[in-house]
Amino acid sequence: MFDYLGKNVVVVGGTSGINLGIALSFAKAGANVAVASRSKDKVDAAVAKLTIENPDGHHIGACFDVRDLDALSLGFEYIAAAFGTIDVLVSGAAGNFPASAEKLSENGFKSVMDIDLLGSFQVLKQALPLLKGKGGAIIQISAPQAFVPMPMQVHVCAAKAGVDMLTKTLAIEWGYKGIRINSIVPGPIAGTEGFDRLAPTQELQDHVAKGVPLRRNGSCEDIANAALFLASDMASYITGVVLPVDGGWSLGGAGAAIAEIGQLAKQKQS
Ligand code: COA
Ligand code: NAP
């Protein structure tokens, strides 16, 4: 449906889960894709998958931790040498673990802030000189924690709220260059590290699905489809938007309860 033939796409944190799904979808649509993360094994495996998805594309991998500015900068030098310019940047590196604020150490809080928020800022700054004006698109991968307060997630709530403010602020600062930036907010996405960490059993994940108005947890493809759209010319007048792709979950998280009340009301009427 979307044609990215010959376009250069960079996905930071693109070696597993949701972001790898996004990288593969861009490759399938014809793009050359660069993925980056800390683990060389994961980077190599992701590049191999990209090559299977689109054997004609030029796919590369870079290893860096977004908290290490020197390594990040070297990684982008490597990407610049291979691609020259970037059409689409996806910034999605993140860390998460459940921890109560009382038990969370300063370093635990700082780790997530440094990866998700400061890391995203540094990634965006590194990518800016390579991004094509008039058509360059940035997609940040946020989370519902950015605007839905969640216990055991104070570090992620603070970091992802900041990520979305980067999106909104830079949409204004960089709009004159013709560069668009939007956030995608995935809901609960089945088969991913992030969801497994917060809901570690199938029973819990099924329970979460009952609270989604569309009555299912999402897939990596659901998120990739939104990314393909937001980075395309079809979205050329959309910037600074924070787009939940969550089956309606973030509308209140009360879907299941409301549905149960509705069922009870129906039963009473009949
Ligand atoms: N509960 C409480 N604190 C925790 C924790 C947990 N489950 N896991 C880590 N921390 C704390 C550590 O204790 C440490 O703090 P301390 O020095 O005061 O003891 C701090 O967080 C950093 O931990 P460390 O393991 O050194 O960090 P790291 O840089 O190696 O890894 C993480 C970063 C912690 C975010 C790690 O979970 C990670 O790499 N995540 C990437 C994958 C992921 O989270 N995927 C889901 C996508 S959102
Ligand atoms: P994941 O598979 O763990 O993906 C995280 C990616 O980031 C991996 O490629 C990881 O690779 C990389 N990464 C982590 N720390 C890094 C660092 N310091 N520097 C560079 N790369 C780093 O998790 P996921 O669940 O698919 O989550 C992907 C994104 O979606 C995240 O932004 C997350 O917040 C968001 N999200 C997920 C869900 C969900 O249901 N899963 C819901 C809402 C939002 P390495 O380990 O090799 O570094």
Image (tube, rainbow, N blue to C red):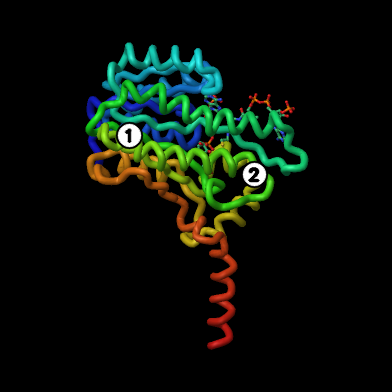
Residue 261 in picture, x, y percent from top left: 58, 75
From what the image shows, is residue 54 above or below residue 205?
A: above
Query: Which corner quadrant of the image does residue 239 belong to?
Result: top left
The numbered disc on residue 267 is none
Q: Amino acid at mark 2?
A: Gln
Residue 15 in picture, x, y percent from top left: 48, 27
From what the image shows, is residue 224 above or below residue 136?
A: below
| Left or right of residue 174, residue 168 in this image | right
Residue 226 in picture, x, y percent from top left: 36, 44
State which mark lies toward you, 1 or 2. 1
From what the image shows, is residue 172 above or below residue 133?
A: below
Give the residue at x 41% y 46%: 222
Query: Which corner quadrant of the image does residue 7 belong to?
Result: top left
The numbered disc on residue 174 is 1
Secondary element at tag 2: loop
Locate the N terminus and report the quarter of the image it occupies: top left
User: Label 1 vs label 2: CA separation?
Assistant: 31 Å
- Residue position for label 2: 153
Q: Residue furthest bottom?
A: 270
From what the image shows, is residue 101 above or below residue 58?
A: below
Secondary element at tag 1: helix
Give the residue at x 45% y 37%: 166
Give the residue at x 63% y 29%: 111
Q: Disc 1 vs disc 2: Cβ atoms closer than 8 Å?
A: no
Residue 188 visible at all: no
Q: Residue furthest right?
A: 103
Query: Which corner quadrant of the image does residue 267 belong to?
Result: bottom right
Q: Amino acid at mark 1?
A: Trp
Going from N to C along the chain, the mark reached first, 1 or 2, is 2
